[in-house]
Image (tube, rainbow, N blue to C red):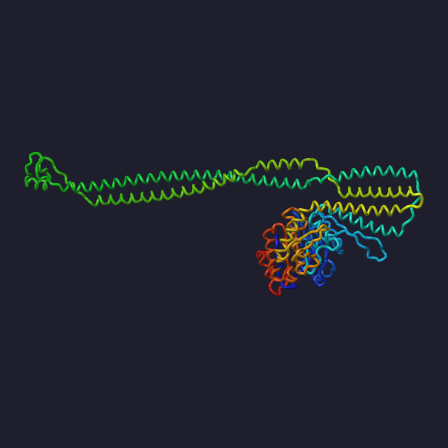
Amino acid sequence: MADGVNLWVADNSKGKTSIFKVLKLALSGNDSLDKEIMGWLREAWVEFKIGGNSYSVHMTKGENDRSPIYRFYNANRQALQAFNPEQVEAAQSFKGVLTNYADFIENLFFREFDYYRLQRTQRASQKDNPNLLTVPASWKTYFKAIFLEATDNSFFYGNQSELVFQMLLGLELTYPINRLKVKADNLKNDIGLHKMQATPQAAADPARLTELQAELQEIQRRTSALTQVLSVPPPPAQATTLRQLEIARNRYSTLSQLKTTLNAEIIGGDNEYNDLEKQATRAYRSMNESTVEMNKRNRRFNDLTEYEQFGEFFNSLEVKTCPSCSHDVATARVVQEKKTGSCRLCTDHQVPAQAIEPEAYAEQIAQLQTEAQGFKVDEYNFKVKLAGLRHQQSLLTKQLDEKKERLAGVSLQPVIDEIEQLEKAASAPPPVVVDVLATVTEMTALNVRKAAIEAEVKALAAPRGGTDTQLAEMELKVNLLEIARTELLAMQAERSKTVLHQLEELYLKHLQAFGLLHYEKVIIDGDFRIHFTKHEQDFKFDELSPGEQLRAKLGLYIALIDMDVQFQTGRHPRFIMLDSPAGEEADQAFLDGLKDTLAYIESALGSELQVFVGTAQRELQTAVAPEKADVRARGEFFF
């Protein structure tokens, strides 16, 4: 399946939910398939990717087998296609007890997503067992942030809801706060058990009194030192510096490449401009040559026309009077000249006949006119070409000016300075990181010991009787754990203000995109419980209608992913399965809002997450491209 939103569209009871449950089985080891489907299911491949690593889960079951074999590969199915999967050695293989596979897949995802195990306390199931059990949150619990079922009316994860919410959001100090609460709950239970078995205090011992007072002074000194350690602000994360350095280097590479590209384009543009100038010069020279040749033809045309006219004029002249003596030329001599060609005046020379042939001159004149017209056409064409070349030069000059202006605005020096500073910070010796949980635990132990010593000192100083020092020690320890947890909660709240405000705004935006336009505000209180304000009234999740509850869950997880994308805050796997999201109270406003939100996820976050939606509402398929919607005809099954 592709990134972004992928739709499975078919009528109800046609296999959409079963596909989701197969994915749930492969990704969490939690089998919620119907017995009938699990009975005829023979094989399933599930391929997934975490970061740059690809993995495949191959589930197979024979007809007579009650449970499938799970084979886990550190490669995608395409890489395995060249071989028979049965002949390729799997990284892990499990058969029989499903919990073995569930433990394996849990450790994989905890390691890949950098999750940690939050804990909760609960009473033992045996009525006669007074002990309190400590239960860690499993990957199956976190998987509820991936698989959103329309029939599930719980907001988060039962008693662990607020803590898991904090972990998915990536808030600081969540782990030590959780551990302190678990320790306090267990101690409170121990106090109750101890009160039923309390014994009197021992008698006084003067030597012991001196020993205890010396130990008190050492405890006070150590407590002051630890208080000083906790007061030091936390150092900046080395990972953050390295990530900023990588971003700065990428920005330098991008700007450097842009500068190189612009320089190359400017040089190429200058060369192109010079080439256009050469073409323009040649066109201008050719145009002048055509003009000269055309003028030559015109002058020759005029000369021939003149010659023809003068030749006809002189041939038509007849000498009738002698220019020397002014006597008339005799008619007989004129006749003789015509007959013999002898000059009518001197009779000694022959007069050659120079007849004028107009056809010959007309042919030359016509040829000259044609040549002149051709040169005129050439001249026009060269003018058109020259104008086109000048226009190209003008456009090219404008583009070059823009690129030169853009190049002038690209400065590498600020990025170089930033990289140098980040490299210094990255290469500097890592600061000493305070282990808050260990420090608070040690302080608690010291204070508990101090209280125990003070109680013992008081008992030793008493004239008779005494106090239960063990009970006092436990009660004081609970008190100190509560104080430490309160302090850490205050520190967490102070450090989380910006993150929570950003989440509230994103969450409200997504709720309104779902058609809940009457929602005015989303508030996350100090205990990390979410409140919704609509019509100026405060509502908790349990007080919302089923349709609104579904929208509230979907909006929260999309907001958490959006926080990770926009602000790099959060630990959500960025993969969501929505089973029949329009199945509960799907009015048209909800459908329109859901469709718009799916389209928003596809366009704005499509490369950052993956969403599978199984729905019977066919109008939702228009939210994505046709190739990303697997639409089955009415009555058709998926499998």
Q: Is residue 122 above or below residue 250?
A: below
Would you identify the image quadrant in which residue 5 lies? bottom right
User: Of all residues shown, which one is farthest toward the top?
Assistant: 324
The x and y percentages for residue 570 are 67, 48
Quarter of the image containing the N terminus?
bottom right
Task: Answer whether residue 80 is visible to the viewer in this image.
Answer: no
Q: Give residue 312's position: percent from left, percent from top.
A: 17, 42
Foreground: 617 or 84? 617
Name which residue lies at 59% across and 37% down. 414
Please state which of residues 628 and 448 is positioned toward the viewer in this rendering. 448
Up-down relation of residue 556 to residue 313 (above or below): below
Q: Quadrant of the C terminus?
A: bottom right
Image-based side of 542 in relation to 599, left or right? right
Q: Is residue 494 left or right of residue 283?
A: right
Q: For the image shown, how many numbered marks are present on the structure?
A: 0
Quarter of the view holding residue 148: bottom right
**Between 495 and 399, the one nearer to me in the picture:** 495
Q: Nearer the viewer, residue 497 or 21?
A: 497
State the image coordinates of residue 8 (x, y, percent, origin top left): 62, 59
Q: Is residue 107 left or right of residue 287?
A: right
Location of residue 436 in the rendering, given as x and y in whole percent from the top left corner: 75, 42
Quadrant of residue 158 within the rendered picture: bottom right
Q: Is residue 145 visible?
A: yes
